[in-house]
Image: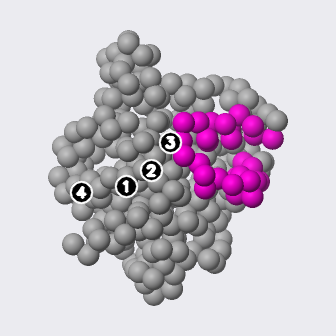
Amino acid sequence: MNTDIIDLNGQSFFLRRWGKPDLPPLLMLHGFPEYGGAWSDLAPHLANHFHCIAPDQRGYGQSWCPEGVGNYAVSQLVSDMAALIEQLESPICVLGHDWGASVAYGLAMFRPDLVGRLIIANGVHPVPFQRAMAAGGAQSEASQYINALRAPDAAVHFSADNFARLEQFFRFGMGVDWLFEARMQDYRTEWARPGRLEAMLNWYRASPLVVAKPGEPRTNLPELPLDRLMVRCPHLLLWGPDDKALLPEATEGLEEFAPNLTRVDIPDTDHWLHHQKPKAVARAILDWLAN
């Protein structure tokens, strides 16, 4: 693994890379509360086939960390990664997990010229996800944590006692045998960088998506430009079926927006499938690309 710092839209971003630079690029986009190093389990299994590129996204790790919620709108996050891809020979393959999936979907939808293939690992397209979160059912209940992350004092709350509550959030209801203490300390180091936790939480605050209370469906939803939210490139959805935060209903109707969709479950995994079974995830990716 090599690291370097590049300029994107006039700002500094930290990258990790695996694989030879002359291999086809694979952009790997992490989610919350991770950082580019989160791909260190999976990337080595793909590095013989791809030049894997894993940035710390805006507000995370060692990358640019502007203040203010408005700097974390999805359009801004997509612009960063579009600038990165424009430095490569595009279109490329993009892989996103969790919030990284939102950026990956944004690239595929709004900059289809840059994305040849889209891979999502336990992440959601905005329309099926909004429908599920607004219904007042199981996904609404599972998404109540978003309110805690959007709270004005969330950074103080989750950083207290050496990030004890954020670590608890990380571990809640999930299989985290991979999260041994030395790795946990790596996460704490990244979270403790000045302004980073507030910035990470601003990703949630900047999102217009609405979370209904359980049993109380919401109808006053943000208008989404459905005709602009199509994923026309080949799309692979990898799913850890034991995920407690994102339920299967959050992807119902995805085919409406991704007509070239392939779904693959990775058994005995949850939200952290790229850590739990990296070999199986890599094999699913390579098999799909081969076909």
Left or right of 152 in this view: 220: left
* Mark 3 crowd level (few <14, some 14–19, many ≥20, 10 Å Cα): some
- Residue pushed farthest top? 216
Query: Is the C terminus in the top left, top right, bottom left or bottom right quadrant?
Result: bottom left
Res 116 quadrant in image:
bottom left
Q: Secondary structure at mark 1?
A: loop
- The residue labelled by disc 3 is 73
| Relative to 216, residue 227 above or below | below
Res 48 quadrant in image:
bottom left
Left or right of 80 in this view: 290: left
Taking the image as drawn, is residue 101 in sight?
no
- The residue labelled by disc 4 is 262
- The residue labelled by disc 1 is 266
Give how far apart the Cα atoms at labels 2 and 4 are: 18 Å
Is 75 or 177 nearer to us in this picture? 177
Disc on the earlier residue, 3 or 1: 3
* Mark 4 crowd level (few <14, some 14–19, many ≥20, 10 Å Cα): some
Q: Amino acid at mark 4?
A: Thr
Disc on the earlier residue, 4 or 3: 3
Query: Is the N terminus in the top left, top right, bottom left or bottom right quadrant?
Result: bottom right
Eye-nearest disc, 3 or 1: 1
What residue appears at the point 33 percent right and 61 percent down from the top-left corner?
A: 118
Is 17 or 214 nearer to us in this picture? 214
Give coordinates of residue 155: x percent, y percent.
Answer: 71, 34
Q: Secondary structure at mark 2?
A: loop
Q: Amino acid at mark 1?
A: Ile
Q: Amino acid at mark 2?
A: Thr
Give coordinates of residue 121: x percent, y percent.
Answer: 41, 54
Is 260 or 89 nearer to us in this picture? 260
First to last magenta residue range: 162-191
